[in-house]
Image: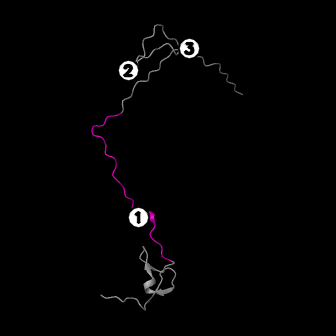
Amino acid sequence: MAYATGKHAYGVCDICGQRYKYRNLRKNWKGLMVCGADYEPKEPQLFPLNYTADAVSLRDARPDRREPLVVLVGSRNDTIFTSVGMQPAPVAKPLKATASVGNVTVDIS
């Protein structure tokens, strides 16, 4: 089927209703024939996002190992770290830790 070229044809804008030359009308992304003032491009939010694949998981993965918490108690010079493995050397005297919280007074009226 052949269509006219629109050299002398007129068309009506689907948004504002004004008459324009047919070749000055444009089809917008919604499929409406509109004039140049009413033409709006498709919003970027409407384009689908390009998702990439998730990261590949490890084969035969194991949970993290929990190391025991070691707290050394004593004065600064009580332990001497050795150069191999940074393990504390044995201490000649026993360690003693003391602490006090203080007094607590509760007054209910």
Q: Identity of the amino acid at label 2?
A: Gly
**x and y percent of residue 87 in the render?**
40, 18
Depth check, front residue: 40 or 77: 77
Q: For this rendering, which residue is in front, 26 or 63?
A: 26
Q: Most extreme residue toward the front, as rendered? A: 83
Q: Residue at x 31, y 34 (%)?
A: 62
The residue beneath circle 1 is: 47
Q: Earlier in the sequence, mark 2 or mark 3?
A: 2
Image quadrant holding the C terminus, namely top right
- The kind of residue tagged 3 is Thr
Q: Secondary structure at mark 1?
A: loop
Residue 4's x, y, as percent? 36, 89
Where 33 sits versus 76, above or below? below
Mark 1 or mark 2: whose residue is earlier in sequence: 1
Would you say residue 61 sits in the magenta stretch?
yes
> SS at mark 2?
loop
Choose top left, top right, bottom left or bottom right for residue 68: top left
Q: Which residue is mark 3?
A: 98
Q: Tag 3, which secondary structure?
A: loop
Q: Earlier in the sequence, mark 1 or mark 3?
A: 1
**What range is drawn magenta here?**
38-63
- For the residues labelled 1 and 2, the Cα–Cα distance comes to 58 Å
Which residue appears at 51% of the width and 14% of the height? Answer: 77
Residue 2 marker: none
